[in-house]
Amino acid sequence: KQEVTQIPAALSVPEGENLVLNCSFTDSAIYNLQWFRQDPGKGLTSLLLIQSSQREQTSGRLNASLDKSSGRSTLYIAASQPGDSATYLCALRGGSYIPTFGRGTSLIVHP
Amino acid sequence: EAQVTQNPRYLITVTGKKLTVTCSQNMNHEYMSWYRQDPGLGLRQIYYSMNVEVTDKGDVPEGYKVSRKEKRNFPLILESPSPNQTSLYFCASSLYSQALPSGGSTWVQYFGPGTRLTVT
């Protein structure tokens, strides 16, 4: 069964730092991997989706990479801002229609 | 505006009193699903539906029912709620397969705002 681990569980950084959030998984037979942002008390907002055949995706200050052979994905956030404070979740979809979520990284960016 | 809506957003109820949480999407998505989110456990899928009248169990279906009579709606039913069903619930929808401009297809989930349920 697929297991997804996100490290670190929590992160607090000063504004302006470049960040790397990690997502590791045990089964490389994935269909795609999706990064979400969740604000307190709110739903999930999709940030980036990487297909199994892709290596990375970029959107603004965000860059997500995928390395199936090592079972890792990273979300890179450039020049972090206080508005980036949220919980970041990765989710993998394999052969079934039941995606597996990591437990998230809680990020605080302080001014 | 494309969206997934859930109602109610907050609900406090008592053990054994049947309740329904509604979910509706306006994107004509075939695939819909329900998740619960608990501290330390992350998001776990309860049920999913591939299309009208097609539903299947996720990872934690015990104590829940769903129905998919219309494409846009996917209600979650708790026939006899118990305190261990206190949780934050999310509905999500997606196209079964979205064609990419570059070829191939993808599968992107859109989430509702969540329903915080407390069972006493």
Image: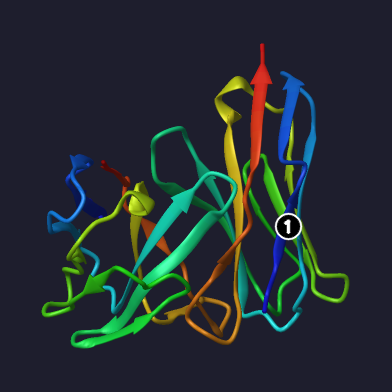
Circle 1 chain = A
What is the quadrant of residue B26 in the picture? bottom left
Q: Position of residue B81 (x, y in %)?
A: 24, 57
Q: Nearer the viewer, residue B68 or B97?
A: B68
Question: Residue beneath label 1, please?
Answer: A5
Horizontal side of residue B22 vs A62, given as left or right: left
Q: Quadrant of the N terminus of chain A?
A: bottom right
User: Relative to B115, is B92 above or below?
Assistant: below
* Residue located at (23% from left, 41% from top): B9
Q: Position of residue A52 (x, y in %)?
A: 68, 78
Q: Nearer the viewer, residue B116 or B2?
A: B116
User: Relative to B116, is B30 above or below?
Assistant: below
* Residue located at (71% from left, 73% from top): A54
What is the quadrant of residue B120 in the picture? top left
Q: Position of residue B60 (x, y in %)?
A: 43, 70
Instruction: Kindly give the residue lying farthest to the top in the view shown.
Output: A111
Q: Nearer the viewer, residue A51 or B55?
A: B55
Q: Quadrant of the C terminus of chain A?
A: top right
Secondary structure at badge 1 equals strand
User: Relative to B70, is B4 above or below?
Assistant: above
Query: Which color scheme does this rendered protein use?
Result: rainbow
Q: Position of residue A63 (x, y in %)?
A: 71, 50
* Residue located at (72% from left, 41% from top): A9
Number of numbered discs on residues: 1
Q: Amino acid at mark 1?
A: Thr
